[in-house]
Image: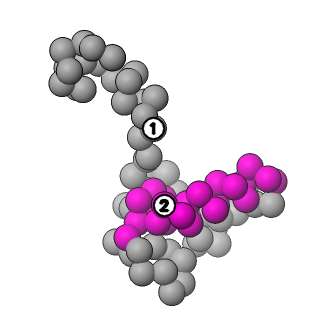
Amino acid sequence: MQCLVPKCKSTTRTRSLCHPHYQQARARIRAGKATEEDLVRRGLMSAPGEPGSTPAVSARGIFDLGSEVRGDGGAA
C-alpha cells in the first residue's frame, strides 16, 4: 500500500503513512497543530483498525511480550 501523502511513493508502515510522514503527523499532533481526529477526517491518516493502519511495535513493546512470543526462552 502506498503512503497517503500525495507524490510520496513510499510504502505504508502505520496508519496508511510511510514512517517519515507518520512521524511528521505525530509531531504536529504533539505540538497541538492538529488532532488525530482531524487528520483522519481530512483523509490524511487512516483511523485505527482500518486497512493500512498496522500499529507500530516499539522495542519496549517487544520486551513486554512473553518469552513464548519472543522465542528467546525468557532472556529479556
Q: Amino acid at mark 2?
A: His
The one of 21 and 34 positioned closer to us in this rendering: 21
Residues 3 and 41: in front is 3
Residue 50 visible to an observer of this rendering:
no
- The percent position of residue 39, horizontal first and vertical second, equals 65, 65
Vertical side of 72 occupied by 11: above or below? below
With 10 as the anchor, is 40 left or right in this view?
right
Q: Residue at x 45, y 38 (%)?
A: 58
As drawn, which residue projects farthest toward the right?
A: 32
Helix, strand, or loop for circle 1?
loop
Determine if the magenta segment contains residue 25: yes
Q: Which mark is residue 19?
A: 2
Residue 4 in the image, given as x and y percentages of width and height: 50, 75
- Is 31 positioned to the left or the right of 57 in the image? right
Does 67 sit left or right of 52 as displayed? left
Q: Which residues are magenta?
A: 11-32
- Residue 2 in which image quadrant: bottom left
Q: Which element type, helix, strand or loop, lies under badge 2?
A: helix
* Mark 1 residue type: Ser
Of the residues under marks 2 and 1, which one precedes in the sequence? 2
Q: Residues within 10 Å of mark 2 (few under 14, many from 20)?
A: some
At x 24%, y 26%, the residue is 70
| Residue 15 visible to an observer of this rendering | yes
Q: Kindly identify which numbered label has been placed on residue 23.
A: none
**Dot 1 corresponds to which residue?**
58
